Amino acid sequence: MAESSGNPPAERIGYITRVQSFSACHRLHSLHLTDEENKEVYGKCNNPYGHGHNYKVEVTVRGKIDPVTGMVMNLTDLKRCIEEVIMIPLDHKNLDKDVPYFADVVSTTENLAIYIWDNMAKALPASLLYEIRIHETDKNIVVYRGE
């Protein structure tokens, strides 16, 4: 209707979500707590030998749908960013020992979401990143939107 009145069509906003799975191990252990406090807070997740997860990460971008390309962004570019930010540094790694960020940050799924957000925000065009959603298990899901 807007076009028939001579007005340009309303700007359209779209969301794209790409899902990626990766496997990693970690141990929940805070340097700011005693060994006993760590056991109390983190329970079996404080096992000195660690434990693993098959994480599923959803990366959602939000932006204007380009009237020429019909895309918010090229999915090939989003896939490349996910490979560089998630798969290469995290897949089949020990988060605590192989990822420098977690040397002094507890490798909770909340902190993993922050790590992924911060690095995806650098890799993507400005203001496109909308949400990081991590499925740690079928029942435990963390959502982070940069807040």
Image: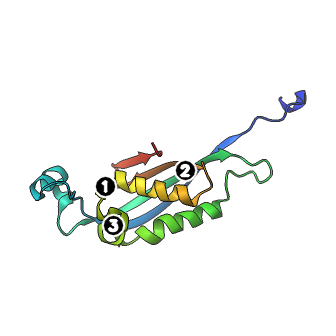
7 up-or-down from 112: above or below = above
Classify residue 71 as left or right of residue 4: left
SS at circle 2: strand
* Mark 1 vs mark 2, CA separation in Å: 21 Å
Looking at the rendered image, the quarter that the N terminus falls into is top right
Q: Which colour scheme is used?
A: rainbow
Q: Nearer the viewer, mark 3 or mark 2?
A: 3
- Spatial CA distance of label 3 from label 1 is 10 Å
| Element type where label 1 sits in the image | loop
Q: How crowded is mark 1: few (under 14 residues within 10 Å), some or many (20 or more)?
A: some
Query: Going by the image, does 120 lie left or right of 144?
Result: right
Label placed on residue 60 = 2
Residue at numbered disc 3: 95
Q: Mark 1 points at which residue?
A: 108
Give whichever of discs 3 and 2 has the lower sequence position: 2
Residue under the point 67% across and 55% down:
73
Asked whether, in this view, residue 141 is left or right of residue 118, the answer is: left
| Amino acid at circle 1 | Thr
The residue positioned 53% from the left and 55% from the top of the image is 121
Q: How many labels does the image show?
A: 3
Q: Where is residue 24 in the image (x, y as percent from the top left)?
A: 35, 67
Give coordinates of residue 120: x percent, y percent. Answer: 52, 58
Tell me the crowding category of disc 2: few under 14, some 14 to 19, or many 20 or more residues within 10 angstroms, Cα based: some
Residue type at the position of mark 2:
Thr
Q: Quadrant location of the C terminus?
A: top left
Q: Which of 53 and 46 is in front in this view?
A: 46
* Badge 3 amino acid: Leu
